Amino acid sequence: MTNDSLELTRRKLLGAVAGTGVLGATTGVTASQLADRESSAISIQAGKVSLEISCGSCSGGKNGIDVGIDPLEPGTGGSETFDISVEGNPSRLWVKTACPPVVDPLGDALEVTALTFQRNDATTTVFSGGSLTELRDELSGGTRLDNQFDDGNGDDDSDACLFPADEVTLKLDYELPDEADWTADLMTELSFDFFAEQCRAVEEDEVEDPFATATEECRELDCPESDCIEFAKFDPQGRGNDFEPGTYDLDELYAEECDVDVDENEYELEVLTVTQKADGDTVGASFRLLKGGHEQDAPPLCKADIRGGPSDEPGPASNVEEIDPPTTRTRGELFTAESVTPAEAHGISHITVWVCCSELESDSE
């Protein structure tokens, strides 16, 4: 083998994976929601309150207003501005988000740099920064917007109703980090649910959180070491060491370890990208687990073992990678040895994956 054959010459991508994922819907509409805490018997006397919310890339959805974000390339970002018009009587305003999915790779990777609320010339920060998952978790219980401005004495203004003449906006700024190139072809979602209440209908000291009874604690993924169970093996040897991006059947399934009945024909491993030496050996690969052809239905991966190399002494190289937090795909390519350069790595002989058993559903149910 010549030195030239040790050089990496190709890094291949699955043809269907081009740009990075889409967030929510992408249809621009104007969405409205009415919320009147008064009973219908006195609503005429007390008047009504309504909100008109306009945004460039959003649509009405089952959880309120779905936000749309165009596909992003790593290192780029954007923003979405919600123009809020209070119509009728002075009002208080709340906003909440739906809980994040238990497993959401793109939501974990996408950074919300800020969520700000502006009333006329005053601006306050509702969320100072973090992942989209963290934003949805923090605001899942709802937060009041109109009283977040300083009253001039260093305190929040507790009696700061919004008026029809006010210019009110909620602005979302976001970006996809440079290193998040592994998020290609992923999707996630974000929705805002707004609630307005007439100020004259309820005294300030009697104001109650409108989302208090409708909010449940968001479920988090719990995958301790005891729940991370060896699940399946992919053996590319029958296909040669130069396997390409594509979708492959799993050669062995160890579902009995999870004590659930699964249909082995339901599960596949989709190789998203590979790195190959000049001699054609595939030495690195990124991949995701599929169930019924869909990533979102698969249990999250918690560990992967990438093996390759000679069968004689010292034996095949083995690189066991913890996937933390667990997710349905690898965060980049994995190689047969972590401590060597890709050019020195052995061709991959097989890949074994572990999953969080508690998230594996029985196919017999």
Image (cartoon, grey):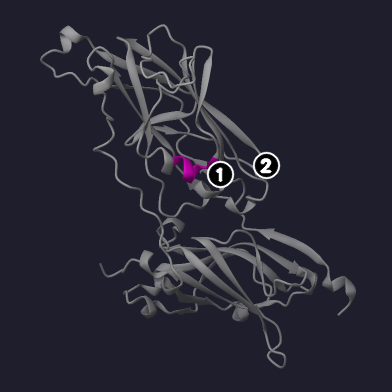
Q: Position of residue 281 (x, y in %)?
A: 73, 74
Residue 361 visible in the displayed image: yes
Question: How many neighbours does mark 2 have within 10 angstroms: few (below 14), some (14-19), or many (20 or more)?
Answer: few
Give SS at disc 2.
loop
Q: Is residue 223 above or below residue 117?
A: below
Q: Is residue 76 rendered to the left or right of residue 216? A: right
Which stretch is magenta?
130-136
Amino acid type, label 1 = Leu
Q: Residue at x 51, y 52 (%)?
A: 105
Q: Is residue 242 above or below residue 174?
A: below
Question: How many neighbours does mark 1 have within 10 angstroms: few (below 14), some (14-19), or many (20 or more)?
Answer: many
Q: Position of residue 55 (x, y in %)?
A: 47, 23
| Closer to the camera in the image, 228 or 61 | 228
Q: Earlier in the sequence, mark 2 or mark 1?
A: 2
Q: Position of residue 344 (x, y in %)?
A: 79, 74
Q: Is residue 229 above or below residue 48?
A: below
Q: Quadrant of residue 75?
A: top right
Q: In the rendered structure, does residue 167 fall within the stretch colored magenta?
A: no
Q: Residue at x 69, y 89 (%)?
A: 315
| Closer to the camera in the image, 292 or 330 | 330
- Using the numbered discs, state the Cα–Cα distance from disc 2 to disc 1 in whole angstroms: 11 Å
Amino acid type, label 2 = Gly
What mark, if any, has residue 110 been given in the picture? Answer: 1
